[in-house]
Amino acid sequence: MTLREALTEAATTIDRREAETLLAHVLFRDRAWLIAHSDTELSSDLHIAYRALIARRAAKEPIQYLTDQQEFYGLNLHVTRDTLIPRPETELLVEAVLHWIAAKPAASPTHRTPHILDIGTGTGAIALALASNLPSASITATDLYPAALSVAEHNAARLGLAHRVAFLQSDLLASSLLQSFAPFDVIVSNPPYVSLYEAATMPDEVLQHEPHTALFAGPQGLDIYRRLLPAAHTALKPEGLLALEFGFGQLESLKALFNKPANGPWQDLTFLNDYAQIPRIALATHP
């Protein structure tokens, strides 16, 4: 069977572009190569492997877990079932932090050598994107789960950024070692924020395959924010930035948490929309 015939067969089951992505993965080639060599014969062993991937994708297993990779902010990240798959919306969180740092006076330490903490790093996406764009930054990235930290450290090594990011196991900011790194210019986090009530409406592709510990945060999806806001306030420098991603319909509840005296005080509270014009990013500074 030729590559063209294998793709035609696969496209009867899944999206053709995804079929091309999986065939390129099996062959360790890119899609352009497939097009240029469509008459090449596919060996029986590779055809069996390819059909197995097609069957898994048809069963709604995320294609990122089938290829073990996902692009994020120009970086090719390794992903596993121990980590949430990085989403395009989270790139807006990276952009917001970069913009905030760039707007600081050029002579200020925050502009020249920002001290940044990424909480709940998962694949390391946010920390590594910031490291690749801020060569003088000091960056620490934490996660509660060792398996996720292992993926993040692997990505840092693959991207030549292992010397730029310190990875640490911690439940938010609870680690005594992490506290010794404080205070920070920036604390950034894309924490779990899906409510338990939303589980019934989530697509199987997410619910059955991505780690629930990286998705759900209590009945309203706000459990992590309730703990994170007061801890981040304590760990930030004066005028330091807290940047958070949050979920659909959580704007007013999150605003109330920021305005709760026990969680602050905070100033310059700002909310940014995602590509679908849904409020997605919260920014606030320590007075």
Image (cartoon, rainbow, N blue to C red):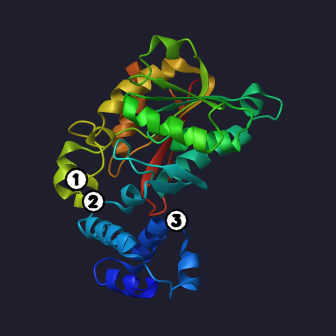
Q: Quadrant of the C terminus?
A: top right
Q: Residue at x 47, y 55 (%)?
A: 69
Q: Where does residue 265 sit, x and y in percent of width and height?
A: 48, 23
**Secondary element at tag 1:** loop
Q: Pick whichever, 166 or 180, lies toward us.
A: 166
**From the viewer's perspective, is residue 93 above or below residue 236?**
below
The amino acid pointed to by label 2 is: Glu
Q: Tag 2 or tag 3, which sits nearer the N-term?
A: 3
Q: Using the rendered image of the protein, determine whether residue 86 is visible from the camera's viewpoint.
A: yes
Q: Residue at x 29, y 44 (%)?
A: 211
**In the depicted view, which residue is nearer to us: 252 or 10?**
10
Spatial distance from mark 3 to mark 1, Cα to Cα? 28 Å
Q: Is residue 130 above or below residue 168?
A: below
Q: Which residue is mark 3?
A: 28
Nearest-to-viewer mark from 3 and 2: 3
Q: Do tag 1 and tag 2 residues touch (Cβ < 8 Å)?
A: yes
Badge 3, how many Cα within 10 Å: few under 14, some, many 20+?
A: few
Residue plotted at (56% across, 25% down): 286
Identify the residue shown where x is 41% and y is 25%.
Answer: 172
Give the structural element (helix, strand or loop) at label 2: helix
Q: Amino acid at mark 1?
A: Gln
* Relative vertical location of residue 86 with respect to residue 46 in this rendering, above or below: above
Helix, strand or loop for disc 3: loop
Mark 3 / mark 1, whichever is N-terminal? 3
57 lies left or right of 41: left
Percent x, y of residue 278: 42, 57
Residue at label 1? 208
Residue wearing tag 2: 205
Q: Mark 3 or mark 1: which is in front?
A: 3
Q: Is residue 99 above or below residue 60?
A: above
Q: Which amino acid does the dot numbered 3 rest on?
A: Phe
